[in-house]
Image: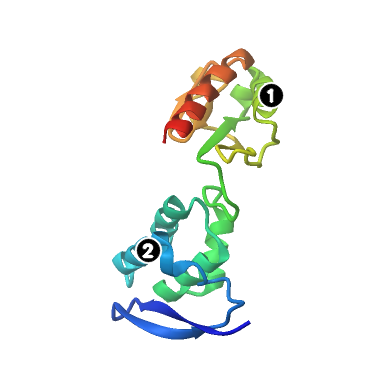
Amino acid sequence: MEDRLSVRLDNSTNERRLEAVSANCCCCSNHLNDDRYTRLNQVIAEYKNQPGSLIPVLHKTQQIFGYLPDDVQKLIAEGLNVPLSDVYGVITFYSLFSLEPRGKHTIGICMGTACYVRGASQVLDALKKDLAIEAGQTSGDGVFTLTITRCLGACAMAPVMMIDEDVYGRLTPDKIPDILAKYRQASKNA
């Protein structure tokens, strides 16, 4: 395969420059036509040289991409002038960040003590059955990612789950299909 030229944005000067890129390079092969990378460069430029900027940049980047792939981690490390190992370390330390693509909606079912004793495991079973996945997986249609959390701070409403920023309490397995149907419909309409 041939080498080709790629346009790279120099974040320190905001100048674009041409670089030779191997045809086998996966880190920039699709950047030219992908506006997510433009948005990423804007986020990096906004936070560059600010102490403690890594976590906010990772949050905004995950909102853009849905997860934090290897090539994006490298761009963040270069753009913020931090070691790639620091970027990876923060991503893997905090459960809010993901190295794998997630569904459009993230479901977090609480398995903390109050939720567990009030039937969270039965609610989890209903979710797994409806979605045809296990905890930690993404549904085949890419709509849902199912995660287990330890406490959502709503123990009085146990058992509790969150879908994105929406909290559902006093759950029973029979409520799951109707709740998921709203998100499925919204995903179809989007």
- Left-right relation of 58 to 122: left
Classify mark 1: residues with Cα within 10 Å, few (<14), some (14-19) or many (20+).
some
Where does the image place residue 86, in percent across and percent down from the top left? 53, 68
Q: What residue is at 67 percent from the left and 22 percent from the top?
A: 126
Q: Nearer the viewer, residue 3 or 98?
A: 3
Q: Which mark is residue 53?
A: 2
Q: Residue furthest front?
A: 1
- Left-right relation of 123 to 61: right
Q: In which quarter of the view is residue 118 placed?
A: top right
Q: Amino acid at mark 1?
A: Ser
Tell me the element at label 2: loop
Q: Contact, CB < 8 Å: mark 1 with mark 2? A: no
- Left-right relation of 39 to 125: left
Q: What residue is at 56 percent from the left and 46 percent from the top?
A: 102
Q: Nearer the viewer, residue 30 or 67?
A: 30
Q: Amino acid at mark 2?
A: Ser
Where does the image place residue 137, in percent across and percent down from the top left? 66, 41
Where does the image place residue 65, in percent across and percent down from the top left? 47, 54
Classify mark 2: residues with Cα within 10 Å, few (<14), some (14-19) or many (20+).
some
Q: Which mark is residue 121?
A: 1
Sequence-wise, the earlier of marks 1 and 2 is 2
Say if 108 sits above or below 65 in the image: above
Say if 28 sits above or below 89 in the image: below
Number of marks present in the image shown: 2
Q: Nearer the viewer, residue 119 or 178?
A: 178
Q: In which quarter of the view is residue 15 placed?
A: bottom left
Q: Nearer the viewer, residue 153 or 86?
A: 86
